[in-house]
């Protein structure tokens, strides 16, 4: 493409939104417009043109985005919000007709990647290693799954098949006392036990849950760029500190086991663009997938410290002008911190 690449980024108020905006602003050949359903989205106050849009479930969502694209001569849409991905995937051909490229995977593979049970079923059928798991839709099935996984001798994890941001995730163990949970753990801790879960879920309906083995080893976030179903960039980073399920400290490590495993996981589907993977080691040190984020991850901007601008690579991949000959600075650590933005109320 000649001239500046005009990019519309959604999710300006997402946790990683401001960082991704700053990463894209490092490239003078990118002209950025941002949008969000929240008129006070944090990214709005970074001096970038902003437009308010409907939420993804609003019937007018796609038509409003198309109008913005036509008014602003947008060439690339860069979605940050998971719920929006399915709307964009289903409407991809509409955007192609007006010359707009959407950084999103196809709808069928999104449905696998965004559903933890479907993902594990898919990988297991291909012989790719996954955590030992069961599926539960009522409390009796939870109890039976825990028994199958040798609870309480072994800790187990329960989590909804479809969720965001650690919602609904609990580590069930009898080794942590209620006293410790009350006085020695912060309110957002993930520990619980089967008795407490029974009190909550015994006689109510709830979403489909995965009940799986607990993986006690190191956890890694893996940032990738995928083009035409092939992994072009893959960068693992160990999560050394997390707050509310979000990585706030870590270190970039060239772990070939993780790189090879995650490449197999991602290339088993027809995904596209920036894709995030979470893996954790089991008791034997073997890494297994926890989940896939079929979009750019908010913490991916940490890779700037390793010399890689992942949001920019995603944009250039969309317009067919990427340079994947990268010199990654392995061994770089990072910490994240809060920063204030101010506006006239």
Image (cartoon, rainbow, N blue to C red):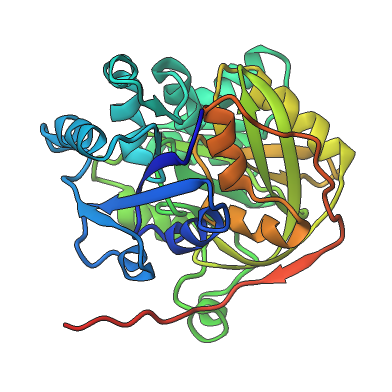
Locate residue 44 relative to residue 338 in the image: left or right.
left
**Residue 43 image-quadrant placement:** bottom left
- Residue drawn at point x = 51 percent, y = 28 percent: 1
User: Which residue is more in the foreground, 319 or 20?
Assistant: 319
User: Which residue is more in the foreground, 21 or 42?
Assistant: 21
- Residue drawn at point x = 29 percent, y = 35 percent: 73
Query: Which residue is farthest bottom?
Result: 183
- Residue drawn at point x = 28 percent, y = 51 percent: 35
Locate residue 234 relative to residue 294 in the image: left or right.
right
| Position of the C terminus by quadrant | bottom left
User: Which residue is more in the foreground, 138 or 273?
Assistant: 273
- Residue drawn at point x = 28 percent, y = 64 percent: 41
Q: Is residue 25 above or below residue 257?
A: below
Report x, y in % for residue 311.
56, 46
Q: Is residue 227 above or below residue 253?
A: above
Report x, y in % for residue 228.
61, 17
Query: Which residue is farthest front?
Result: 3
Q: Is residue 42 above or below residue 267?
A: below
């Amino acid at each position: 493409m000649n001239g500046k690449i005009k990019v519309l980024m959604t999710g300006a108020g997402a946790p990683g939104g401001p960082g991704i905006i700053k990463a894209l602003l490092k490239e003078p050949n990118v002209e950025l417009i941002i949008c969000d359903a929240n008129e006070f989205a944090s990214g709005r106050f970074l001096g970038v043109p902003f437009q308010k849009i409907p939420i993804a479930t609003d019937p007018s969502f796609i038509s409003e985005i198309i109008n913005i694209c036509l008014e602003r001569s947008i060439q690339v849409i860069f979605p940050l919000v998971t719920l929006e991905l399915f709307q964009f995937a289903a409407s991809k051909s509409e955007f192609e007709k007006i010359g707009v490229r959407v950084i999103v995977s196809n709808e069928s593979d999104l449905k696998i990647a965004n559903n933890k049970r479907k993902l594990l079923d898919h990988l297991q059928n291909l012989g790719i290693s996954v955590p030992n798991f069961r599926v539960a839709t009522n409390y009796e099935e939870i109890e039976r799954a825990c028994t199958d996984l040798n609870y309480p001798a072994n800790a187990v994890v329960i989590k909804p098949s479809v969720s965001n941001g650690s919602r609904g995730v609990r580590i069930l163990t009898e080794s942590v006392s209620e006293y410790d949970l009350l006085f020695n753990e912060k309110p957002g801790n993930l520990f619980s036990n089967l008795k407490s879960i029974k009190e909550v879920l015994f006689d109510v309906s709830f979403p489909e849950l995965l009940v799986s083995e607990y993986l006690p080893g190191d956890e890694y976030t893996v940032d990738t760029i995928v083009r035409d179903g092939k992994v072009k960039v893959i960068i693992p980073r160990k999560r050394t500190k997390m707050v509310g399920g979000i990585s706030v400290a870590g270190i970039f490590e060239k772990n070939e086991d993780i790189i090879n495993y995650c490449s197999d996981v991602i290339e088993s589907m027809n995904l596209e663009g920036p894709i995030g993977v979470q893996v954790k080691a089991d008791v034997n040190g073997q890494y297994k997938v926890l989940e896939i984020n079929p979009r750019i991850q908010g913490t991916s901007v940490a890779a700037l410290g390793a010399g890689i601008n992942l949001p920019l690579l995603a944009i250039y991949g969309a317009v067919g002008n990427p340079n994947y000959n990268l010199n990654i600075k392995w061994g770089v650590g990072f910490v994240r911190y809060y920063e204030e933005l101010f506006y006239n109320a």
